[in-house]
Image (cartoon, rainbow, N blue to C red):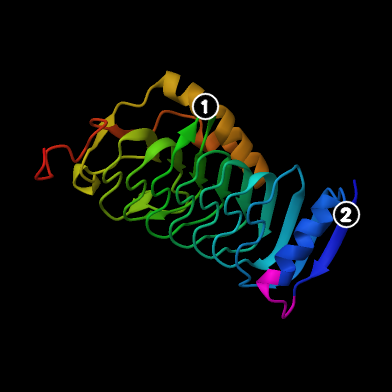
Amino acid sequence: MTSRTINAKNMHYTPLNKRIKELVKTGVQEIVLENVLGQRFIANGLRGKVTIHIHGVPGGDLGMFMSGPTCIVHGNCEHAPGNTMAKGKIAIHGSAGDAVAHSMRGGKIFVRDNIGYRGGIHMKEYGDNPAVLIVGGLAQAFLGEYMAGGKIIVLGSGSDRAVDGREIGSGIHGGEIIVRGDVDEKQLGVGAITEDFGKEDLDAIKPLILEFCESFSLDPKQYLDTKYTRIVPASSRPFAGKYTWE
C-alpha cells in the first residue's frame, strides 16, 4: 500500500485539501494527516478507495459529498461530518458535534462516543446503499429530524438513556431510528411512532453492530439482544394538511 503523511499544522484548509486530492490522483492509497486543528472540508468531494487517517480535530463538513473513501478520525470531530456523503465510511474515535450525517445519501458513519443536536437530519437513501449512522454513546434532541431514508442506531453506552432530549424523528417520512432501551412517548417528534423491536429486527442490524464494534475494538455481545425501540414514520407526509393550499 502506498502511503503519504501530511503535517497539517498551521495549514489553511484550501491547500490541505488540494494536496490530498493531488495524492489521490497519483494513486496513493493511504494518507496520514498529522496536527489537524479545525481545518474544514477535509475529503470534500473525494472519490476512490483511499483511507485517510486524521490525527487531531477536523473542522466542519468532513467528507462532504465524499463518494468511496474511508476517513478514520483519531479523536473528536466538529459539526456535520458526512454532509451529503454518497458512499464510503467515516469512523470517529471520540465524539462529534451537531448535524452529524446531515443530508447523507449513502455510506456509513460510526461515532464511538456522543453526538450533538440534529444527528441524521434529513438523511436519505438511494438504491441498495442506504445511509447508516451508528452512535455508541448519547445523542441529543431532534435526532433524525426530517429523515427521509436510511438507518440511525444509538447504543447509549454509559448513559441511562440513549437520547437526551425531545423531538426524536420530528418530520420523519422515511427510514428508521433504532434506540437502545426505552423511549418515552413525550420524546417523539411530529410524525414519529414507535414499533416493537423483535428478533428479525436484531438479525437485520447485527452485521452493522458487529462492524461498528470491530471498528473500535468493542465487545458486541452487550448489544446483541432485543432491548431496543424502533422509531418509524407514521406516514409519508407528516405535515400534510398544515399548509393553506391543501
On the question of residue 228 being in view, the answer is no
Quadrant housing residue 190 = top left
The magenta stretch is 9-14
Rate crowding at label 2 as few (under 14), some (14 to 19) or many (20 or more) other CA atoms within 10 Å: some
Q: Secondary structure at mark 2?
A: strand
| Front-most of residues 52 and 141 | 52
Q: Is residue 6 above or below residue 156?
A: below
Q: Residue type at mark 1? A: Gly
Give the dominant element type of the magenta stretch: helix, strand or loop. Answer: loop
Picture disc at residue 79: none
Percent position (x, y) of residue 139?
40, 53
Q: Is residue 125 left or right of residue 233?
A: right
Q: Residue at x 61, y 54 (%)?
A: 63
| Front-most of residues 211 and 144 | 144
Q: Residue at x 79, y 60 (%)?
A: 32
Percent position (x, y) of residue 65?
58, 50
| Front-most of residues 200 and 66 | 66
- Looking at this view, name the residue that lies furthest to the top: 200
Q: Which residue is mark 2?
A: 3
Q: Is residue 195 left or right of residue 154?
A: left
Q: Which residue is mark 1?
A: 127
On the question of residue 55 being in view, the answer is yes
Q: Is residue 147 magenta?
A: no
Q: Secondary structure at mark 1?
A: loop
Percent position (x, y) of residue 164?
33, 55
Q: Is residue 88 left or right of residue 21?
A: left
